[in-house]
Amino acid sequence: MLESCEGPTTLGVTMRDFHSLTEKEILALAISLEEEDERVYSDYVEGLRESFPATAAVFEEMRKEETGHRQRLIELYRKRFGEHIPLIRRQDVKGFVARQPLWLSQPLQLEKIRGQASAMEVETRRFYERAAARSSDAGIRQLFDDLAQEERAHAERADSLEREKLGHAEREKEDDAKRRLFVLQIIQPGLAGLMDGSVSTLAPVFAAAFATRNSWDAFAVGLAASVGAGISMGFAEALSDDGSLTGRGRPLLRGVVEGLMTTLGGIGHTLPYLIQDFRVATIVAVIVVIAELAIISWVRHKYMDTPPLTAAMQVGVGGALVFATGILIGSS
């Protein structure tokens, strides 16, 4: 919305108050706003086209409407003020709400995009309402009033476009695509990290525990193994691929997720060794290990479509073998 705000500058750049703008400048600003909205919708379309084609089609229709608004504004500007249109942007005028550059983030998040699109329409409508109130030229005021009404109708238009483009079958497809992206970008690296952290650190933790019979020594070894594994797995995942061909999303995000989950998986059965009594600490650690393996089995069943018994057997057998290896080595 356009409300006067305190302070003459933003980051050292002088900003104009809306009330100080002439009709010519307001019309130039309107052109710039429509051009920016048009480009934002275009970026939405490109970012969503592959995974969410139906929603991309909705934003393509909205982009076309913004193009029409811009063309009408430019035509009126030429009639009133000539060919040169000064560059006056939203960041040059006080009171506009800062927008998060969601269209630069990959993968795009549907709910956040839809929310921002709605906020864009509201802000633009309020701009046109205030611009119309400031205009003394009948033609300019009429166009601003018309565009304000059209922006007000955009919410209904967007709903009708969604009903038209997003039928039940299309919504199911997009929901399925969202689930696949979530699995590829979050669940898979997170599950790989949790499995590696939980299983691979079993041997060194319990080997140190049974070799020394000292809780603190076991904790120190487990902590080092967990953090080291987390760093290693995080870097390995981040450098594995950039996600452009596999659709697995941003490598940095995957690396952070996998690294943190790897560390968490190892820390879980390491923390009990903060208990001074070695026997009690070991009993608690074993209980934690069982809980970790159960969680991994559940995640594999829920998100990787692995039958529950198969998931439990795969994770349980692997964990038991590593656990037994650590005890045998530590007791020898």
Image: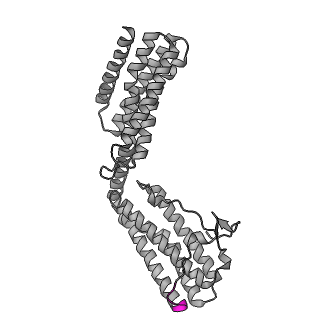
Residue 180 locus on image (x, y percent): 34, 47
Residue 317 inside the magenta-drawn segment: no
What count of labels does the image hold?
0
Name the residue: 41% across, 30% down.
229
Residue 166, visible in the rendered structure: no
Please tell me whether residue 139 is drawn above or below residue 230 in the rendered image.
below
Return the x and y of residue 9 as percentages of the image width and height.
66, 67
Tell me if 204 is positioned left or right of 81 in this view. left
Rendering coords of residue 85 (x, y %) = 52, 83
In the rendered view, tell whether residue 150 sits above or below residue 213: below
Q: At x 45% / y 31%, what residue is drawn?
A: 263
Residue drawn at (56%, 82%) of the image: 27
Q: Please indicate, yes or no, whether residue 124 appears anywhere in the rendered image.
A: yes
Q: How was this image coloured?
A: one colour
Q: Is residue 241 above or below residue 164?
A: above
Could you tell me which residue is drawn at 65 percent across and 74 percent down? Answer: 16
Q: What residue occupies the far front of the structure in this picture? A: 12
Residue placed most toward the observer, 330 or 192: 330
Residue 259 spot, x, y in % from top left: 43, 36
What residue range appears in magenta?
A: 79-84
When asked about the image quadrant of residue 11, the answer is bottom right
Is 120 placed above or below 142 here? Answer: above
Position of the C terminus, as image quadrant, is top left
Q: Residue furthest top?
A: 332
Looking at the image, which residue sits at the far right? Answer: 6
Q: Quadrant location of residue 50? A: bottom left
Quadrant of the snapshot with the N terminus = bottom right
